[in-house]
Each structure stands twice: as C-alpha cells, then as structure tokens.
C-alpha cells in the first residue's frame, strides 16, 4: 500500500533533517554556551557551565525533532491550491509512537535529574547551605560575613577586626559566606563563581565556594531592592594567600 | 459583496423589562465609581489620622473599596443580588433585556448576560491590558536601549517594570479564556448560554473595575517591588502599592466567579450525546485551567491581604524585626504563582490544538494523551512552587524534592508537543492565518520550555536566577507561546464573531514582525543573561550594551507587529471579506450555527453522535 | 452529529426555554461546592500562615513583648515601656472566646438546618421558616460580636522612639487577627444570605414546594460552621507559649 511506503519515506526524510538539526544544536551547546558565559573562577562555576553544555546537548535532539516535523509539514504536507483541502488520513493515535515518546522523555528527564541531583549533593556545588550546617563547623577555611543594605555590600572577617567595603579572598581556600541584610531582601551573587544566595533581614543565609583563579570578579545584586538596585555592585579580588594576609594587615582596625 | 452590518442590526423591539438596568451602562459605572471613591476617600481622610498627604495606606485602600463598590452598583452588577435578597426575582422580560435582545451595538457598553457579548467585551479588555502593558514594555526597552538612565529615572523605571509585569499577567490570564471560554465554549457543548449568565457579566465588569486601580498605582506613588511584591520591599514602597494590591483582590473575585461558571457550564449543560469524550479539546482546556485557577487564586487574595494588613494595621506577617518573615510571603505568592502560569498556558495550548485539527484536516492525535497531559500538568503544577525560591536560602533541604517535581513537569509538556505534531503528521496543511501562529508557537515553546528545565536544575539556577536569562525564558513562554496562541485563537474565531475574515495580508505581516521580533528581542536577552546581567536593572554596565540595543530593536519590531494586528482587527471588523458561517469547514458546534450567532445559539438543541474530529472518516 | 431536537427543554407561551428545576438545582449545587472548594483553599492559606509563623517563632516574635497600655494612656501620650506586661500565659492567649464563637456559628447552622427540614416535611400552611432564617442570622450576628471581642484581646506591643509610638502586633496577634477577620467576613455573608431567605420565604418565593435554594445556602452555612471548628481546633492546639 502506498501508505506504508509513504510513511517509510516520511520517516527517512524527517530523520535526515532531524540529524542535521541535532548536529547544529550539539555544536551550539558545545561551543556557544561556554563562549557566552563568564570565565569560570571556581569549581562550582565550571560544573555549572558543564551542566549548561550537557543540558543544551541533550535538548538539541528534542528541539530538532519538533523543528524537523514542522519543516516537513510546511513543505511536503502543505496544501497548495485554492479552497479547503481534502481531509487527511484519520489517524486518531499511534500507540507505539506515544509510548516511545513517553519513555524517551522520561529517560531524558531522569538523566538530567540524576546529573543535577548528583551535582547538588557534591560538596562545592550546593547553593545556599543551611545555617545549621554552618553552626556545626562546616568545612570552610575562612568565613566572611556579608551584609547587604540599600544600596551597598559590606564585608567583615570574623576572627579579625577587619570590616571593609572591598572583598578580598585567598585563592584555593574554601570560603563560607554568612549573608544577611539590614533592610530589604537583596541577592548576593558572585558572577564568575556561580554562587548566589539572598540576603534577608533578621536571618543569616550561607553559601560557600572555593575560588580557584586569581583575578577580579563581580558581585551583583539580584533581587529588586528599591531605587538603586541596578547600581548595587562591587568587586571581589582573589589573590594569593600572602597578598591576602598583607591586605588584612593593612586594613584599619574597627571594633 | 452583500454585507454591511445589516444582519447584525436588530429586527424587533427592545424588551420592556430591565428596570434600573435601562439607565445603567459603563459611563454611569464610571461616575458612580468615582463618586463612591471620593466619598470613601473624604470620609476616611477626615476620620483616620492620615499623614496629611491625603493618601495614607488606609485611606487608599478604603477609597479603592469605594471605587469598586460604586462601579459595580453603577453598572448594575449588584442589582440581581439585591433583588434576590428582597425576594423580587427577575421576570422573563427582565432576562431578555439583560440578554440584550434587539439592542444592537450599545449592549456592549452595558451589563449584558449574553455570553457572546461578554466574549466580545473580554476581547476589548484584553486589548486594553495588552496595550497598556505593551506601552510600559516599550518604556522599559527604550530606557535599556543604552546604558545610563537616559529615558526615565530609577523610580519611574521600577514602577514601569512592576506594573508591566502585573498588567501582562492579567492580560494573559484572560487573553484566551476571557473571549473564547465565554463566546465559544457554551456553543461547543451545545448550550444556550453559560450556567450563570448574570455571574458572567459580573466577572467581566469586576475585571474592568480592577484595571483603573492597577494603572492608577503608577500615578499615585512609586512602586519598586516588581510584580512579585516581595516583602519587605513591598511594605516599604509607596502608596501606589495599595492600589496595586486592591486591584489584585478585585481580580481574584472576578476570576473565581468566572472559573466556577466555566466548570458548571461544561459539567452540567452539555447537550444530549455530548459525553465527556466527545468534547472538543478546547473545552477540556478551559475546564482544567478554571479548576487550577480555583486552587491558585485564593493564595493571591490571602498574600495581598496580609501585605496590606502589615502596611495598614501594623501586623507583623512579613516584618522580620517583629518575628515575621519575607519567606512566608514568597511561599504564599509562589503557591499561587506557579499554578497560575499553567492557568495561562493551558487554554492557549487547547486553542492551538483545536486550530491544528481544522487546518491539518485530521483528527486530534491521541485525544486521551492531550487530556491526560493537561490534567497532569495542572496537578503537578501545585507541587513545584519553591523552584522560584532556590536561591532565597529557605529550606535548602527541600531543593532536591522541588527539583524532582519541576523536572517531572517536562514530561506532560512534551506530550502536548506529541499531540500537535501527531495531528500535523501527514495532514493536508492549510496555511491560512491561524496556522501561522501554531507553527510560531511550536518554534518558540521548545525554546521557552527547555530553558525552563535549565532553571529547574539548582546549580544552573544558582547562576541564572535573577538574571535576564530568566526574563528571556518566561517571555519565550508568555509572548512566544501564550500570546501566539491567543492571537491564533483570535484569527481563528474572528469570522464567527464578525462574519468577516481578518485581513490575511495584514495578519501575515503582523505575524512575521512579531515572530522575528520575538527571536531578536529574547535570544539577545538570553545572551545578556548568560553573560551575567541581572534582571530588574534600570541601567547596566557597558559590556551589556550591544545585546540590550539588539533587544530593544526587537521590541520595537514586536510593537510594530502588534499595531499592524490591531489595525487589521479594527478595519476588518466592518470592512473585511465576508466569510459565511463556516469558512474553515470545521466540525465543532460553534461553526454549525449561523453568523451572527442568534441570541439563544440554537433553534433546537442538537443531539450529538460523534466527536468533532471525524476528518477522513466515513460519516 | 445530527441536529435534531433533544427534547430536554419545554417552551412556554412567550417562547422562553425552561429547564426542569432539578436540572437548575444540580447546576447550582455544583457551583456552591466549587465555591466552598475555593474557600477551603483560602482557609488553607490562612492556616499555612498561622502554622508557619508559629513554627518559626517558638520563642521570640510569636508572643514577643506582650502587654496592654497602662490605664488612662492613649497612643498619643504613651511613652517607652509604658505598658503593663502580662505574665500569665493564659491571658496572653486570645483563644478564650474560641469555642463560644464556634458554638454561635454551629448553633446558627443547626437552626437553619432544622428550619429547612421543617420546610421540606409534608406540612401545609407551615409558615415557620422565616423565623428560623432570621434566628440563624441573629446567631451569626452573635458570632461576629464575640469575634470582635476576641480581637480586642489580641496581644500587641508598642515600639517607641523618641517622638512617637507605633502600635504593632505580635505575629501571634497578627495571625489571630487574620483568622478573626476571615470569620467576620464569612459571618457577614451568612447574615445577608439569612436575611434574603427570611424575606423570600415571607413573600412565598421559598415554600414547601420550592426549597432548593435553602439547601444551597445551608451547604455554605454548614461549611462556615465546620471551618470555624477547624480553625478553633488549630488555634487551641497550636497556641504557643
């Protein structure tokens, strides 16, 4: 029957278009994604970028399938000519196709979920950690108290008497941030390190990271906090351990 | 070329009944609302110790209540309630008058119980909301065209973005459900009207009453809290917030009434033979969305009320120094906010599925999958809300479970794609105007949906939350998917409402402008976000200037496309090519009744013997 | 599909289509249940609020500085610390009138229900229903009065700075106020419904043959009573210290 041959032809042609589009999508995932993202300054960020790449590569065949069928519908199956087209075949459903789609999407979702949960569970990649963990000691080698207010960030280093509007961190040392706010909710985000946690009044939230590259990076506020929300940014300087101690020593002592 | 408005002109006398309603219309409502608002303002200003500026929180809220009550009285929406209480029910002549029999165009300015009139009124309301939100969007994008505050200052910008968000959310909640669940669904199920025609009119006019409150918030006092009204900033912010919150409280009343009406209509007014498996998929979409809204919107009512209480009466729900917490506000808000986006999405998808069957000339592919995906989407959506709170620091141990539920949602979403693609499969694709929007939706929704999955992954969300990446994601869904569904629905049902085709040339021009505009605006916005630009920023650093300029140019393109569409809608209404009652040769019931649709829809109620997707099958 | 008459309606002399009263009633019953469902969700949101604040505020905040202003002082003349602290924990709680309020609402629902049964029983010329309806409304009014009394006793405290005093409510007080306000709003709706039933039955619109609307109102009325029991139970069980 021409039906079956037609179907085989459709499957084959759509497969070719799908494969082409998938390749393009995978290339976009592999190259465009990391190129567009900030250069990583921590293991957390590197894993975050890797996750973006994997998700894009995984999404490519899905998007490609939708686009391939659409392209085919717009060209091969398109009704040309005047007037109402004749009816198409009375396909009310297709058990195998539906099952395949359901199983395929479930497998893909599970894969992304397992990757994501695994990453979440591993030490450095967790986002905002519970204050309770911090109270029990954690594994941080330094602690920095971050205070947000309208519209600036200030930092203090418990154990020293240093309070500063600048954030200096030693490279390759785990740092734990205790974040709070003096007024409204702000969002504490170190862009190149991939960590973010909100600063809430009356509460301390925590996040931690190990910076692994010397350089200067950006902190931006990510929760609308009033008039100058867009200007509430500052820099974080990651320096060698020696330079860090020098900087600490050079800061005026504030009680 | 026969047609003018001839067969839309009344051919008989206006009924004798109606009582007070004979004198009431939109203008009396405006006057009455203004009067009551002024009286409420004056009394509360006099008796309560306001801060002397004329607009303290209490005064603003009381004036808003005055406005809504006055407006409802002035349009006659409260008259049926009053008549019930005093035991003087409406007689047949009253009902005919309220249904607008033989009253022509002017019944659209009044409280009218005819679901078709309410549907047209919702089209106008949607256009107003989209227009207002669109103007605010252009204000936002114009300011962001270059770095530095060259167009508006921070305060104005923050107000623009807060109100833009809320106006557009309201617009999209009603964009498909308002016009089409009202105009089309009763006819689709074989009924003469909605279950509760007077409540139908009430829900429309209550929504109308809410709009000046929301837009007025811009005028009264600065808003700098975004549409998500996070505490504590929402408790600090200017008096405009009270109008904003009161407009939402008013809106939740409107939407609750409308949702109950839709569900009751479909569940109890189906004609003989219209069993549940023969319902058009759009009807199911309307029911599922209405039920989900009934669950979600009470949270909105509660969170806004608590916020107002903190501002007006000194309660401490969200005030940290008094033991309250902003996290409570966020939980309550997102318990509403996430199901709400599916209330917005599901009717649009239902309409697009309907369109696809007609323009591919094929049955709906796997009706049960379509229905199952909508129901499971709605059900799961109640379990994912805290994915908006991954970076707040609230309950980190709940991150994993919410990540699981959120990623699970991608499965029913994917099944919706299967249904539409399966319906296209080997169809005879008739590329008329409504179909363009289906393909545009498919292209955009993949991008919007997939980027949502990115955000559901906590390590990615730690980077992307609060950046322009999120903004681009949800605009791909709201503009690229829902709006495309709403416009497709408009193009599809336009001939049923007006008896004329929407101008195809102008329609296709608007499609290409909007489609290209969406890609330019929001792909560029993804790049801004990936590179590290935060959202809700009134200005930005130099490194983001190119992507923002490109986004703004895209936004102007979208605006051009929407203006072309508006022009097409207006000019085709009376000057378009006549279409006849069933130009698309569709099989759903609304196309089998004449155009214009008679007052009670059917001469005699039909008996149904099959579903409306019998394309390609022997009759 | 075919388009022939499905014979579910009849037309009267004026051409109006009418449906059987049972059909209309079934529709209205679904509507009331859906409305009760939405109301149930909003009660759930308020309960979530109460329990959340109770959960995070086991020591501070929930009760915070609890006191009543010293006799004779008004808000305008108050100074810092110028209140009498309450040390007795039971006095700090507002739940003292809980069960009275619940009782008033339950009694009002019972009165309505009994009245409905009276109406439906096969007794001609029974004109008692209006009295049941107005009595039920009166009981709901008592509930409002009691609720207002309870709200007066909500713990509050004063934040003073040099030149002004601001009245603030503890989170416990705030949560009680929210619940109390909700009860009052529902009771006002009940009173309006009760007045409507009274007038309608007095005029004969509601009668032994036409009682469907009474049952609809009864559904909602009983729901309000049930919800007050739930809220009363929650605020008593999780009152705090």
Image: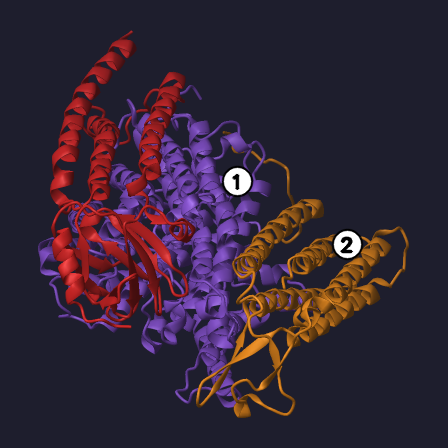
Q: Which residue position is annotated with label 2?
A: C210
Q: Chain of mark 1?
A: B
C190 versus B358 height, above or below: below
> Is residue B616 at all visible to an observer of this figure?
no
- Residue B92 is marked as none
Mark 2 surroundings within 10 Å by alpha-carbon count, few (fewer than 14), some (14 through 19), many (20 or more): some
Most foreground residue, B538 or B111 = B538
> Is residue C234 at all visible to an observer of this figure?
yes
Q: Quadrant of residue B365?
A: top left
User: Circle 1 — which element?
Assistant: loop
Chain coloured red in the rendered structure: A
B450 versus A167 height, above or below: above
Q: Quadrant of residue B141?
A: bottom left
Q: Quadrant of the C terminus of chain C?
A: bottom right
Chain coloured orange in the rendered structure: C
Q: Colour of chain B?
A: purple
Residue plotted at (49% across, 55% down):
B297
Q: Nearer the viewer, mark 2 or mark 1?
A: 2
- The image shows residue B315 at horizontal and vertical percentages of 52, 72
């Amino acid at each position: 029957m021409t039906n079956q041959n037609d179907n085989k032809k459709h499957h084959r042609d759509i497969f070719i278009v799908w494969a082409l589009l998938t390749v393009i999508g995978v290339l976009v995932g592999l190259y465009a994604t990391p190129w567009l993202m900030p250069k990583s300054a921590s293991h957390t960020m590197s894993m975050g970028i890797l996750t973006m790449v994997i998700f894009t590569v995984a999404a490519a065949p899905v998007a490609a399938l939708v686009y391939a069928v659409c392209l085919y519908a717009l060209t091969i199956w398109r009704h040309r000519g005047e007037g109402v087209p004749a009816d198409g075949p009375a396909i009310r459903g297709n058990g195998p196709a539906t099952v395949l789609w359901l199983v395929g999407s479930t497998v893909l979702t599970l894969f992304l979920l397992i990757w994501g949960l695994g990453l979440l569970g591993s030490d450095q990649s967790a986002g905002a950690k519970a204050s309770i963990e911090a109270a029990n000691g954690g594994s941080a080698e330094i602690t920095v108290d971050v205070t947000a207010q309208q519209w600036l960030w200030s930092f203090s280093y418990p154990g020293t008497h240093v309070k500063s509007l600048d954030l200096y961190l030693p490279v390759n040392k785990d740092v734990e941030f205790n974040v709070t706010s003096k007024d409204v909710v702000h969002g504490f985000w170190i862009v190149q390190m991939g960590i973010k946690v909100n600063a809430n009044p009356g509460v301390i939230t925590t996040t931690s990271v190990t910076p692994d590259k010397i350089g200067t990076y950006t902190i931006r506020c990510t929760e609308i906090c009033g008039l100058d929300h867009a200007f509430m940014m500052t820099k974080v300087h990651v320096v060698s351990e020696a330079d860090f101690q020098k900087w600490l020593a050079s800061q005026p002592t504030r009680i | 070329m026969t047609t003018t408005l001839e067969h839309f002109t009344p051919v008989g006398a206006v009924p004798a009944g109606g009582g007070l309603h004979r004198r009431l219309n939109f203008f009396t409502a405006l006057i009455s609302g203004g009067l009551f608002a002024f009286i409420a303002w004056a009394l509360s200003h006099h008796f309560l110790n306001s801060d002397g500026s004329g607009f303290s929180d209490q005064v603003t809220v009381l004036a808003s209540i005055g406005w809504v009550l006055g407006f409802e009285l002035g349009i006659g929406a409260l008259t049926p309630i009053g008549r019930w209480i005093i035991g003087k029910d409406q007689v047949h002549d009253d009902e005919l008058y309220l249904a607008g029999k033989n009253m022509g165009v002017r019944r659209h300015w009044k409280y009218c119980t005819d679901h078709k009139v309410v549907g047209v009124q919702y089209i106008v309301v949607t256009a107003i909301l989209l227009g207002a939100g669109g103007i605010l969007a252009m204000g936002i994008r114009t300011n962001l065209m270059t770095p530095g505050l060259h167009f508006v200052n921070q305060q104005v910008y923050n107000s623009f973005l807060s109100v833009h968000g809320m106006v557009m959310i309201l617009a999209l909640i009603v964009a498909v459900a308002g016009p089409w669940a009202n105009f089309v669904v009763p006819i689709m199920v074989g009924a003469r009207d909605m279950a509760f025609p007077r409540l139908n009119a009430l829900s429309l006019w209550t929504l109308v009453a809410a709009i000046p409150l929301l837009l007025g918030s811009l005028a009264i006092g600065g808003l700098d809290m975004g549409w998500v009204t996070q505490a504590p900033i929402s408790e600090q912010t200017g008096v405009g917030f009270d109008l904003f919150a009161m407009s939402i409280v008013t809106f939740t009343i409107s939407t609750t009434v409308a949702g109950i009406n839709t569900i009751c209509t479909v569940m109890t007014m189906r004609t003989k033979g219209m069993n549940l498996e023969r319902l058009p998929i759009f009807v199911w979409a309307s029911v599922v969305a209405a039920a989900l809204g009934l669950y979600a919107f009470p949270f909105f009512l509660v969170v806004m009320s608590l916020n107002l209480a903190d501002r007006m009466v000194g309660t401490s729900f969200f005030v940290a120094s008094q033991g309250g917490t902003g996290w409570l506000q966020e939980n309550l808000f997102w318990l509403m906010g996430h199901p709400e986006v599916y209330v917005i999405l599901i009717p649009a998808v239902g309409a697009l599925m309907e369109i696809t069957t007609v323009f591919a000339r094929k049955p709906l592919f796997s009706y049960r999958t379509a229905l199952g995906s909508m129901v499971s989407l709605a059900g799961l959506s109640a379990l994912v809300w805290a994915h908006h709170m991954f970076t707040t620091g609230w309950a980190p141990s709940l991150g994993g479970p919410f990540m699981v539920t959120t990623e699970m949602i991608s499965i029913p979403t994917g099944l919706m794609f299967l249904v539409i693609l399966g319906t296209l499969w080997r169809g005879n694709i008739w590329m008329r105007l409504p179909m363009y929007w289906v393909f545009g939706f498919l292209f955009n929704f993949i991008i919007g949906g997939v980027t949502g999955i990115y955000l559901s992954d906590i390590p990615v969300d730690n980077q992307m939350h609060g950046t322009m990446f999120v903004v681009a994601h949800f605009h791909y869904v709201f503009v690229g998917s829902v709006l495309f569904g709403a416009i497709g629905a408009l193009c599809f049902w336009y001939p049923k409402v007006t008896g004329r085709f929407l101008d195809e040339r102008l329609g296709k021009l608007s499609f290409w402008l909007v489609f290209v505009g969406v890609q330019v605006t929001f792909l560029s916005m993804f790049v801004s976000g990936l590179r590290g630009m935060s959202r809700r920023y009134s200005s930005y650093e130099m490194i983001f200037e190119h992507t923002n300029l490109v986004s703004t140019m895209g936004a102007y393109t979208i605006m051009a496309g929407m203006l072309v569409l508006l022009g097409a809608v207006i000019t085709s209404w009376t000057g378009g090519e006549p279409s006849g009652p069933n130009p698309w040769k569709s099989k759903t019931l609304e196309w089998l009744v004449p155009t214009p649709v008679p007052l009670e829809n059917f001469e005699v109620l039909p008996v149904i013997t099959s579903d409306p997707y019998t394309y390609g099958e022997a009759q | 599909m075919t388009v022939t008459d499905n014979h579910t309606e009849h037309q009267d002399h004026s051409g109006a289509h009418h449906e059987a009263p049972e059909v209309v009633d079934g529709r209205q019953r679904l509507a009331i249940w859906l409305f009760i469902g939405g109301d149930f969700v909003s009660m759930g949101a308020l309960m979530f609020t109460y329990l959340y604040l109770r959960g995070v505020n086991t020591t501070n905040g929930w009760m915070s500085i609890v006191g009543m202003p010293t006799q004779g002082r008004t808000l305008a003349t108050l100074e810092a610390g110028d209140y009498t602290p309450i040390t007795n924990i039971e006095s700090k709680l507002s739940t003292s009138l809980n069960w009275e309020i619940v009782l008033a609402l339950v009694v009002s629902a019972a009165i309505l229900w009994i009245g409905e049964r009276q109406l439906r029983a096969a007794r001609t010329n029974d004109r008692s229903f209006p009295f049941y309806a107005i009595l039920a409304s009166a009981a709901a009014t008592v509930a409002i009065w009691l609720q207002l009394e309870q709200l007066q006793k909500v713990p509050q405290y004063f934040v003073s700075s040099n030149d002004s005093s601001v009245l603030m409510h503890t989170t416990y007080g705030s949560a009680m106020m929210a619940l109390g306000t909700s009860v009052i709003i529902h009771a006002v709706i009940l009173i309006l419904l009760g007045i409507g039933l009274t007038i309608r039955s007095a005029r004969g619109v509601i009668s032994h043959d036409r009682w469907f609307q009474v049952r609809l109102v009864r559904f909602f009325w009983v729901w309000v009573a049930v919800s007050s029991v739930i809220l009363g139970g929650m605020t008593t069980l999780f009152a705090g210290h």
